[in-house]
Image (spheres, rainbow, N blue to C red):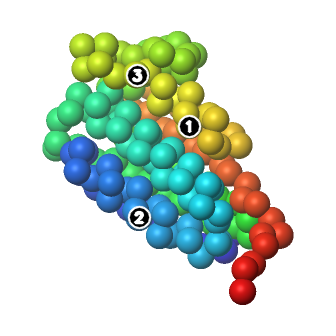
Amino acid sequence: MNNEMYVEFSSISENESFARVLVASFIAQLDPTMDELTEIKTVVSEAVTNSIIHGYNNEADHKIAIECKLYDDEIELTIKDKGIGIIDIDEARQPLFTSKPELERSGMGFTIIENFMDSVNVISTVQEGTTVMMKKQLTKNKTVCK
């Protein structure tokens, strides 16, 4: 491992953009492509939003943790909450599934995460929380314009 960071923040929707910018700034040292950077920011947004809306039911007095580890050309990203957990992870990972249809959620969070990351592992225990662990290999041999 070359570098790592850990941060915890309140479970309020305003912190979703903070989390995106934080992770993007941290991984910038690996010189990701613009597409890779956009994908990782989107993944962070989806996972943090899931924690806020589904894990904590929009209650602001909880914490979300992000851990990011950088290797030569790989990112390990973990987003964790101590919320209500997921009863059926396989069902939650299905496209268009949402536990909050009344909020007009698209149900595409996990689908987006899985499409943008190389590996995704979800561990969840009811009434204890959810951990989403992801990895992404970055593009090698980038062309540099001078």
Q: Whole-Å distance between the Cαs marked 1 and 3?
A: 14 Å
Q: Is residue 69 left or right of residue 141?
A: left
How far across and how far down the image is residue 88, in percent?
49, 14
Q: Which residue is mark 3?
A: 106
Q: Residue at x 50, y 70 (%)?
A: 26
Give the number of the mark in front: 1 or 3. Answer: 3
Asked whether the viewer can see residue 62, the reply is yes
Residue 72 image-quadrant placement: bottom right
User: Looking at this view, is 43 or 52 the one in front?
Assistant: 43
Q: Whole-Å distance between the Cαs marked 3 and 2?
A: 25 Å
- Viewport quadrant of the N terminus: bottom right
Q: Residue at x 47, y 30 (%)?
A: 109
Q: Which residue is mark 1?
A: 113
75 over 82 or under it: above or below: below
How far across and how far down the image is residue 56, in percent?
26, 32
Please tell me the numbered disc located at residue 38.
none
Residue 105 image-quadrant placement: top left
Q: Which residue is mark 2?
A: 22
Q: Residue at x 44, y 21 (%)?
A: 107
60 over 73 or under it: above or below: above
Q: Amino acid at mark 3?
A: Ser
Asked whether the viewer can see residue 82, the reply is no
Q: Whole-Å distance between the Cαs marked 1 and 2?
A: 18 Å
Q: Secondary structure at mark 2?
A: helix
